[in-house]
Image (cartoon, rainbow, N blue to C red):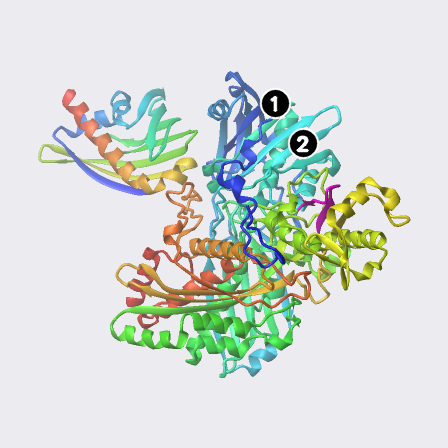
Amino acid sequence: MKLEGTYKFKASQEKVWEVLTNPRHLEKAIPGCEKLEEIEPGKYDVTLKIGIAAVKGAYKGMAEVADPQPPQKYRLIVEGSGSPGFVKGEALIELSHQNQSTIVSCQAEGQVGGLIAGVGQRMISGIAKMMLGQFFKQIGKELKAL
Amino acid sequence: MPEKQEGKWVGKGMKRKEDLRLLTGRGRFMDDIRLPNMKYAAILRSPYPHAWIRGMDISQAPKVSGVRGVLTGDDVAAMSQPFPVGVPIPPKYYSCAVDKVRYVGEPVAVVIADSRYIAEDALDMIEVEYEPLPVVMDIEEAAEPDAPILHDNIGSNIYSHRFFQYGDMQKAYEEADLVVKGKFLFPKYGSTPIETYGVIASYNPFNAELVIYNNYQGPFVNHALVAMALGIPENKMRWIVPTDIGGGFGTKTGLYPYIALIALAAKKTGMTVKWIEDRREHLLASATGTDRVTYMEAAVKNDGTILGLKDKAMDNTGGYIRPPEPGCAYRSTGNHTGAYQIRNLDREVLVVGTNKCLTAPNRGYTCQELYFSVERLVDMVAVELKMDPAEVRFKNFIQADQFPYTTATGGIYDAGDYPKAFQMALDKIDYKKMRKEQQQARKEGRYIGIGLATVVDPSVTNIAYVTLALTPEQRAKGHPKSGSGESVIVKLDPLGKAHVIACTNPQGQGHETVISQIVADELGIHPDDVTVSDVVDTHDRVYTITTGSYSSRFASVGVNAVVAATRKVKEKMKKIAAHLLEANPEDIETKEGKFYVKGAPDKSIQVRHIAGTAHWNQSALPEGMDVGLYASSLLSMPTSQPPDQLDRVDSSNTYGFMAEAIVVEVDPETGQVQFLKWASVHDAGTILNPLLLEGQVMGSIAHALGGTLYEEWAYDENGQCLTASFQDYLVPTAMEVPMVDIGHVETPSPLTALGSKGVGESSTMSVPVAIANAIADALAPLGVTINELPLSPNKIWHLIQEANK
């Protein structure tokens, strides 16, 4: 399952970078994220609570801000598993400057397994798209609140 | 209640004795059984299709209040052996994954708790560390040497591989005017019985005996397999089956690994443990038929004569191979050439493994796969030769005067009149007129197609075919296998009412009704005076490993056993009657509950007096006769023999016939298929009960419709099952099943007591290819080729778009 999106923020590239890599903001922006705790620089323990189709459940796992090249790009990796199965996602996030705004382009690839794949797969790409939208909408809010 | 009628009961549409209890909610199914102090199991299943289990932390689960124990793969490996299976190098298939998982849904641990809720919650507390491995999902890729390997001890994903030659295919090629080829893909689909699997196990440590309630359907070899895996003698493991089973269709032959698993849970905890499979578990990890890739070609003459068939068939049994597989590849050996006189064959057979859920026989047991290629190819021959497809079939049929007919592969077809039955199907749809209408419709831009299929329906498995997985040389070193046993006990009580104790283990077929009809006829009594107990208990029933309700056995060997036991009782009754009436036993005849002397109907005695004498007054019996009135039969079919040196085998014992004639209209804009006419003609020998026969035929049609248009156990490229609920696994409902004009030809079988033979699987074999032929015929002007199922509207639409390019 592959997803793409481009998002525009009226803020400097450095500021957007800061929000997009700061665990305090990521915790609020990652949909369903209940906990995000740093275990080492750039690596976090996460707890996610997500409902896909009829399957709601908690996933424990990790998130990682990998290969950071501030303030241009990094890879965001999220993995979790729980009773409904597992979720894995990796997004390449690239920032660029344009007319006092910052453009964030995101290329994501996701995988689910176990029960959620068996009963929710039809919905998953739609839900993932929605969650990606939610993520960047919240990032926008976090930026405004700075 | 059955209607009151006098005279012959067999052949009448007597209503089912079973229905009163079933329709009023008084059926007793697996989940209705509750034992004292029963605990409940939930199973943790792998979310990965292929992964090492690197670690498992179960320490938190027992802390949940109400949890009584946890069983892991390590326990299973310590307490049991892998199930035996008849392939050269068996994979280590335990009831639970031990160090590696090989399909999504494979059990990895069991939690036993005071309730299912607690057990399910505690599953969340188990942490499993998986190391995912590359997956292989495609049959042909799995057989490649560089594919990810599922089982290191085998070294490849090929479980079984054999070559067969019958007749002289080389000569067939030399004599042929042309060769017609195709590649055919058959999907993985299942049965979805309304009742899922269920097991209750208790272990008594004082006598080391396991008592297990379960709703398996047979064959009884499952009992032996579990005993071998658990390392206990068979007589220390008692299986009891509930009064009613809510459908089997072959799927419930795949229950036995769970019987072993729950038995181990009971043994480890010392408690009585119940597990009922939920629907998601069933759709993820129960059992399906095999998906199959077939390359097949026919060597034909210009007049339509098919001289020979060459094929390579590759079956997929998923993450492991387990009995009765590799039967999938060999079950249809005897009827490989269907209804035709084809004497030359060249075959290559492979059974491979992929990271998909495991298999079991699925109503039709690979005959739908076989005939999908044979009967598509027959239509392709007709297209190549510009002949009518009906004409090609008539040209190649085995004729009515050729029975018993021994096929090139060793099948002994007992009886039939294929041209007659096929003609009946053609007449029902007014075939010639329909062809003209089709031409007219094409001029109007409408896509109407006529699909035909004529197939032989094998019933009553001869267990011998499973040994074809071994070469004749390998077989010579082991013990031969053959047989197809069934047992029945008939007894009369002191007031002359009959009770039949059967062991057919039915799952809704109506055996109680048919047994009552038969016994009533044989003894001259009323079906209401016959009761039937067909509830299996391995400690108080007599059986052989082939016993059970599968492979459409009842109407052939089941009926033979009923008749044999009843006639033994009747012989004894005649002797008693003759003794009391001072006549010869040969002169005694029966009618309406009375035994009388031939030619002197006033010299008679009632059944209840004969029975009463046998029970109450031994002094009135002929000298030396045992008291009481009962007889038993435990018999097989004489045709059940091991394969010969040339790999020929009579893989089933009786062979029916079906002809389908289906008219469809396809909407090229939407890919939607509409049924305009449908005739289905069957020859299952003598009809025992037309109501039950109609039920079986309509059921098999509905089942086949699912596999043809809707159902597929679908996986994504990562090995995830996509169809674990009825939202995604589409099953046809009554709304989708069209009206079908059903017809019958009755050619009595010489091998069965009443001339009847099995019909439970029937149209599941013929319908998929008949519909495919109809759609191919409809879309022929567009240049569309149909060689795969299911034919969903979007698949048909895509095929049309591809053809347009």
The residue sitting at the left extreme is: A99
Nearest to N terminus: mark 1 or mark 2 = 1
Q: Amino acid at mark 1?
A: Pro
Q: Amino acid at mark 2?
A: Val
* Magenta span of residues: B480-503
Residue B702, percent from left and from top: 45, 54
Residue B586 higher or lower than B222, as above or below: below
Residue B451 higher or lower than B272, as above or below: below
**Is residue B323 at least partly visible in the picture?**
no
For disc 1, the marked residue is: B36
Q: CA distance from mark 1 to mark 2?
A: 13 Å
For the point 34% across and 20% down, which residue is it?
A: A38
Residue B123, percent from left and from top: 49, 26
Q: Are marks 1 and 2 on the same chain?
A: yes
In the foreground, A47 or B800: B800
Query: Is residue B493 on the magenta stretch?
Result: yes
Residue B329, percent from left and from top: 59, 58
Q: Residues within 10 Å of mark 1 (few under 14, many from 20)?
A: few
Residue B473 higher or lower than A92, as above or below: below
In the foreground, B204 or B309: B204
Q: Chain of mark 2?
A: B
Judge left or right: residue B292 versus residue B497.
left
For disc 2, the marked residue is: B211
Q: Which mark is residue B329?
A: none
For the point 44% across and 73% down, which residue is it?
A: B427
The residue sitting at the front extreme is: B602
Number of labels in the image equals 2
Q: Are marks 1 and 2 in contact (CB under 8 Å)?
A: no
Helix, strand or loop status at disc 2: strand
